[in-house]
């Protein structure tokens, strides 16, 4: 506590604590939800699809965070969001029914998506453009380290002590609430480089960023929802085995995320996004034909690493955006990111019953469209030079 007070004037520390608080709850929820839903509530692919669609609705209305800024500071919104995330996670295990899980998922998701929206906004406001990719890489590393701790804890508590799901959900949710309170009482309200607009803003010159965000949200759902479900349903992975898989992902991300952040500065956003989307086309295509648990696990790990490259998309926005647009654009981009996410899991849940392979073929197509769009990013993006068409 004394160390936190000593460095409480440094906004980066606040951002790193924020990055640790979110996965304490969300990583536990994500790691347990497939097994918990199947074992406790008898979920099939249809109910999982509906649950994941409900989970994305708060992300779809993330633009409403702009209206909250009319009555409270952005950091206050962040603290309240973390508390909602923590409480939603804490009570998940105490409502093991279809509608109970739908309710706790929505509550958890409201906190998660608003916290992520404000975290992105604050990061882009408080960190200059030269350091932004590096700081974002470190944030991902902090989040992965926290997730690593959670997955290790899950492995020990479930496989060694056979602890109940509801107790684990309760512990992880309360830890997030505690960190939110520490952040609220130990940090001042930091000022960004520009006063933020308190209204919804859609700018024509950001069109490429909006499109890339839309397709990123669509294909991300296939990984988040169905890649993990594939491991459990098709290959019979236990919670312990899934936790070990998350452990591997966490270790690699801790090491690679800061390096990816530096690579964005060195290579530029266009090359990094080309690598990400090209790689995802191959990964999703391989998911569709995977019949071996080892191969599927390897794809899952590589898939997870590629998501760290999303730093480049946020760096691209930082370079082209008006500083006063950041908070509004962060909310709008989260909503755009979740347009497909609200519908896609439920629709693909029905497709899953017919052919799981076709779900991943859809993912490969979405990644390919993103690959084509990424080629429109200029070598040096900036206001007035947002795409190759605006370079003159």
Image (tube, helix red, strand yellow):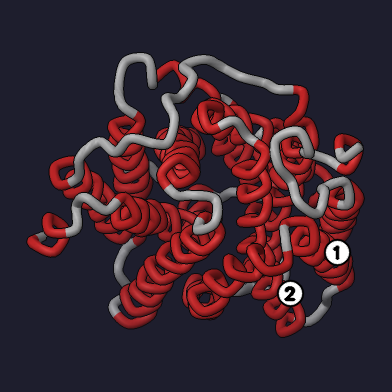
Residue at the spot 33% in from the left edge and 42% down from the top edge: 82
Position of residue 110 measured from the top left corner of the image (x, y, whole percent): 44, 33
Q: Which mark is residue 340?
A: none
Q: x%, y% of residue 328?
A: 54, 26
Q: In the image, is 178 to the left or to the right of 99?
A: left
| Left or right of 178 in this view: 369 | right
* Label 1 Cα crowd, 10 Å radius (few <14 / some 14-19 / many 20+): some
For disc 2, the neighbor class at 10 Å (few under 14, some 14 to 19, many from 20) is many
Q: Residue at x 47, y 60 (%)?
A: 135
Percent across and percent down for residue 149 are 36, 72
Q: Residue at x 59, y 48 (%)?
A: 43
Residue 353 lies, with reference to residue 105, above or below; the image says: below
- The residue at which mark 2 appears reads as 299
State the residue at coordinates (53%, 33%): 323
Q: Which residue is mark 1?
A: 278
Q: Please state, as top left, top right, bottom left or bottom right, where the N terminus lies in the image.
A: bottom left
Q: Are marks 2 and 1 in contact (CB under 8 Å)?
A: no
Q: Quadrant of residue 153?
A: bottom left
Q: Looking at the picture, how far across and down is residue 300, in whole percent? A: 68, 71
């Amino acid at each position: 506590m004394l160390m936190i007070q000593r460095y409480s004037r440094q906004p980066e520390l606040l951002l790193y604590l924020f990055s640790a608080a979110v996965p304490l709850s969300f990583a536990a929820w994500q790691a347990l939800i497939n097994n918990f839903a199947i074992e406790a509530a008898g979920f099939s692919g249809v109910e999982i699809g509906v649950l994941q669609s409900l989970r994305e609705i708060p992300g779809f209305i993330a633009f409403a965070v702009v209206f909250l800024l009319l009555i409270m500071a952005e950091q206050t919104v962040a603290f309240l969001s973390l508390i909602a995330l923590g409480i939603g996670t804490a009570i998940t295990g105490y409502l093991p029914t279809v509608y109970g899980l739908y309710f706790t998922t929505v509550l958890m998701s409201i906190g998660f998506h608003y916290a992520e929206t404000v975290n992105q906004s604050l990061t882009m406001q408080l960190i200059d453009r030269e350091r932004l990719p590096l700081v974002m890489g470190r944030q991902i590393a902090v989040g992965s380290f926290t997730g690593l701790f959670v997955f290790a804890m899950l492995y020990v508590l479930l496989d060694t002590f056979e602890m109940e799901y509801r107790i684990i959900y309760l512990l992880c949710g309360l830890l997030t609430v505690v960190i939110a309170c520490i952040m609220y009482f130990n940090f001042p309200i930091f000022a960004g480089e520009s006063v933020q607009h308190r209204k919804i803003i859609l700018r024509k010159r950001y069109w490429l960023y909006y499109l890339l965000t839309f397709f990123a949200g669509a294909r991300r759902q296939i990984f988040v929802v169905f890649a993990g479900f594939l491991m459990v349903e098709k290959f019979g992975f236990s919670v312990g085995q899934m936790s070990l898989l998350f452990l591997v992902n966490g270790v690699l991300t801790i090491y690679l995320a800061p390096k990816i952040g530096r690579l964005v500065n060195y290579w530029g956003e266009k090359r990094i996004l080309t690598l990400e989307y090209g790689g995802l086309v191959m990964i999703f295509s391989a998911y569709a034909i995977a019949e071996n648990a080892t191969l599927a696990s390897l794809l899952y790990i590589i898939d997870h690493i590629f998501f760290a490259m999303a730093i480049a998309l946020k760096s691209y926005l930082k370079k082209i955006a008006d500083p006063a647009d950041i908070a509004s654009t962060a909310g709008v981009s989260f909503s755009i990111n979740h347009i497909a996410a609200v519908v896609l899991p439920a629709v693909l849940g029905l497709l899953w019953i017919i052919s799981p392979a076709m779900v991943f073929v859809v993912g490969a197509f979405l990644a390919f469209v993103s690959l084509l769009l990424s080629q429109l990013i200029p070598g040096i993006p900036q206001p007035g030079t947002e795409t190759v068409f605006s370079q003159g």
